Amino acid sequence: MARERRRPIVGQSSSSSSRIKSPAPFLSKTYDLLEEEEERGRREAIERGSWGQRVVSWTADGTGFVVWSPAEFSELMLPRYFKHNNFSSFIRQLNTYGFKKTASKRWEFQHEKFQKGCRHLLSEIHRKKCEPSAFPQYLKASEESNNSPSSTVEENNTTRLLLMQENKNLKKERMELQMQIAHFKTLELKLMECLSFYWDDHHNKVRRLC
């Protein structure tokens, strides 16, 4: 007797192959930031006839991006996309996802899966399993930097300014937390006063009824 052929069950295709992985929000936001800045710069170039000063942009070949002005990037771009203004925190996140700093005299970053016009590759970028230190190599001397004294001094000055900015941000956050604590303590005292007044008033009413 001929064997029955097993018919494939409809809808039995692997769910894992049909699922579309979503990239990490940090990567999507960084990509959107670059694309929107590119579009904004293109519109300004059409209106003015030339490209204006850019805060951040893709590299010429589209295989990386450059933060031309860390100060303006922190003040204007980070709050809009990431709800903070800490440049050091931003580059630590880049390090977490395996980005490399590829230039010694400017903040240029690169990842083989993070390229202009290749948004579909973002889902293939994953966080590192462990970080060797709290600060990435971007905040230290770049391995690819030439060892000339002027380059080293410039790197050290930039690093020092970034650390000073982060220290300033941390002090600001601490002051805000202290103010919030003081505010909550004041609310607590007022609440205790209200409860005390309510208790005394209630106790007096009970005594009059008795």
Image (cartoon, rainbow, N blue to C red):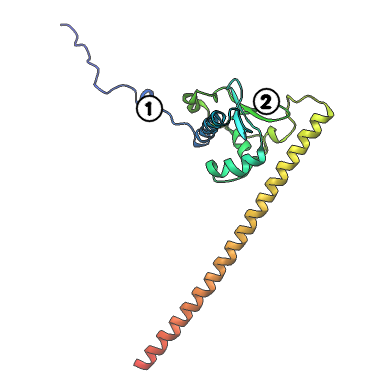
Instruction: Locate the C terminus by quadrant.
Output: bottom left
Residue for point 61% across, 22% down: 60
Image x and y of residue 164, in percent:
72, 46
Which picture quadrant has residue 94?
Answer: top right
Dot 2 or dot 1: first in sequence order is 1
Q: Element type at marker 2?
A: loop
Q: Which residue is mark 2?
A: 102
Q: Position of residue 2 (x, y in %)?
A: 17, 6
The disc at residue 19 is 1
In terms of secondary structure, where does tag 1 sit?
Answer: loop
Measuring 34% from the left and 23% from the top, which residue is drawn there?
Answer: 14
Front residue (pair 4, 122): 122
| Residue drawn at x 80%, y 31% as measured from the top left | 152
Does any portion of residue 89 appear in the rendered image? no
In x, y percent, where is residue 129? 57, 32
**Place of residue 75 in the rendered image (x, y in percent of width and height, measured from the top left):** 62, 44
- Residue 65 marker: none
Looking at the rendered structure, the kind of residue marked 2 is: Thr
- Mark 2–mark 1 distance (CA, rounded to whole Å): 34 Å
